[in-house]
Image (spheres, helix red, strand yellow):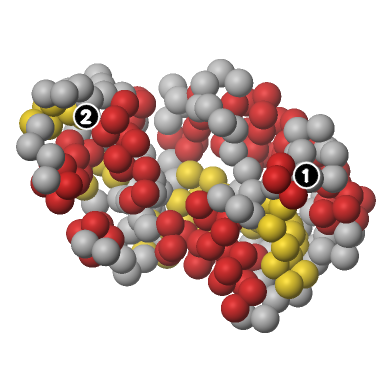
Amino acid sequence: MKIAVIGGTGLIGSRVVRILSARGHEAVPHSRSTGLDLISGEGLPEALTGADVVVNLTKPSTFDETAPAFFRKTMGNLVIGAAAAGVGHAVILSIVGADQVPDLVYYRSKVLQEDILKAGPVPYSIVRATQFFEFVDTVLSWTSDEHAVRLPATLMQPVAADDVAQTVADVSVGVPLGGTRDIAGPEVFALDELGRITLAARGDHRAVVTDDGAGMYAAASGYALIAKNGAVIARTTYREWLAR
């Protein structure tokens, strides 16, 4: 199969391209660096020519109020372009619980992206992933200083990027789901606990202060970010990933 991977040079995209190529598929990465601008649509017809599947892994540079416009424009362009090119399957990567955290503009934006795809004429699949192991250090940096890291006790079920990429690759070469498949890690943590585990592994002796108003994930409550029944549960644990 020929698979156009938009955002194919990023954290997940580069892994998806590698997995699909190893399976014998023609996985072609596309991004701004290869001449594709999904906001303007420049380079999109060329990227989709002859493609059986398109995988959209693009994201905005910031998670602020500009995100809805980004996803509205890029997803709209992709749906129109994929239909015109006769692409038979469109896949996007979204977030577990995106519809459960309406106070986060980025999560609302991902729901918007999903809705645009669902309303379009191209058969589709949505992969929803929990938070990546690879982003935990960034999350800690948002609410930290030289003395402490402040984190809410928000429950989450983080997952390795390698495992997410595997699921995206599996879905992209399968029959369109016409729905959603979730992927999550094997363990549930409170975010403040995850912070303590991470700092200990890094040899960082700062204290983690539980603050249920700190940072972006303070907006999520209960089990909003936890995978539901039927999700793919990855094997890689957080401590195994830290030890690599």
**Image spot of residue 39 (x, y percent):** 76, 33
2 or 1: tag closer to the N-terminus: 1
User: Which amino acid lies under the numbered mark 1 shown in the image of this protein?
Assistant: Leu
**Image spot of residue 134 (x, y percent):** 37, 49
**In the image: residue 51, left or right of residue 202:** right
10 Å crowding of disc 2: few (<14), some (14-19), many (20+): many
Q: Quadrant of residue 240?
A: bottom left
Q: Quadrant of residue 111?
A: top right
Q: Nearer the viewer, residue 64 or 9?
A: 9
10 Å crowding of disc 1: few (<14), some (14-19), many (20+): some
Disc 1 element:
loop
Question: Which residue is labeled 1 in the image?
Answer: 36
Q: Decide: is 214 above or below 124.
A: above
- Say if residue 29 shows up in the picture: yes
Residue at position x 34%, y 36% in the image:
138
Q: Nearer the viewer, residue 147 or 96?
A: 147
Q: Decide: is 9 above or below 73.
A: below
User: Which amino acid lies under the numbered mark 2 shown in the image of this protein?
Assistant: Pro
**In the image: residue 183, left or right of residue 57:** left
Considering the image in quadrants, where does the N terminus appear? bottom right
Q: Quadrant of residue 41?
A: top right
**Marking on residue 152:** 2
Q: Distance from label 2 to label 1 (Cα)?
A: 39 Å
Q: Nearer the viewer, residue 38 or 114?
A: 38
Considering the image in quadrants, where does the C terminus appear? bottom left
